[in-house]
Image (cartoon, helix red, strand yellow):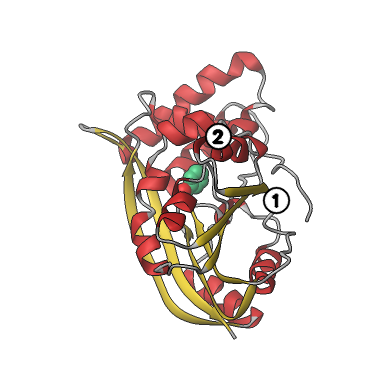
Amino acid sequence: MRYDTPSLVRWNARAYDSSFGYVSAHGAPLIDLLDPQPGERILDLGCGTGVLTAEIASRGALALGIDGSPAMIEAAIAHHPGLDFIVGDGHDFTVADPYDAVFSNAALHWMNRDPDAVIECVRMALRPGGRFVAEMGGAGNCSALTAAMLTAWREHGLNEPHLPWYFPSPAEYAARLEKAGFALRIIEFFDRPTPLDECPNGAADWVRMFAGALLEGVPPATVEPLLRRVNELAAPALRRESGWMADYVRLRFAAVRH
Ligand code: BEZ
């Protein structure tokens, strides 16, 4: 196992858990798809602060949470004493004993360096017949948010930012799973506009939270005008009377290891 932190992501575990609790709240249907059984060994890949790991454990499964961010794992251990959590890279982990299922919510799109390596690690972690049940950002995810970012960066004369996410189409991800030795059981692809309830400053807050590392390359005096421009550009698509929405697109699937 190699332990490291994704280079572009500087997670703030407290903000992630409170302001962005929807990551966990929206995980309930995925847990239903997983259908954890008492005594099953289930690995939660990209577990964040461990809310869904704890939900899986509450169904009687033996859950292990793994995440690339030491800050997230520290928070997970603090919030859920008695559960097991480790820091690990989704591209490069091994387990001593095989699992009945690997579960992942809103995390696979961060493992963008080599999606096939991630799928292979998952396959190796599963027993034959074991399930891979996950939800991630799919093709077109955050398109208004990212278009606003790219335009604002360009208008300010900055180099185009390398966006640190992988948002595949259902066809692409299904092909990767099947090539790796999984039988696909279910794949769903749907829009899920998501209120940014805790983002009073809209898209700018979202960028700070999820793409903060990209701001490190921006001259300090440019950051505020840049983010103001992101908000101006994103507002027509994403600001409603009720508040800001993120234009999320979900790819949800269940597959079984041959
Ligand atoms: C998502 O859940 O789709 C997502 C969240 C933060 C950054 C990028 C994507």
Rendering coords of residue 98 (x, y %): 65, 72
Viewer can see residue 242: yes
Rendering coords of residue 164 (x, y %): 62, 46
Q: Quadrant of residue 177?
A: bottom right
Q: Is residue 71 above or below residue 187?
A: above
Q: Residue at x 46, y 73 (%)?
A: 254
User: For mark 2, what is the residue?
Assistant: 78
Q: Secondary structure at mark 2?
A: helix
Q: Which amino acid is tagged 2?
A: Ala
Viewer can see residue 142: no
Q: Say whether residue 225 is left or right of residue 22.
A: right
Does mark 2 have its CB less than 8 Å from ligand 1? no
**Quadrant (top left, top right, bottom left, bottom right) of the N terminus:** bottom right
Rendering coords of residue 26 (x, y %): 35, 51
The CA distance from mark 2 to mark 1 is 18 Å
Residue at the extreme top: 221
> Foreground: 236 or 23?
23
> Foreground: 203 or 225?
203
User: For mark 1, what is the residue?
Assistant: 88
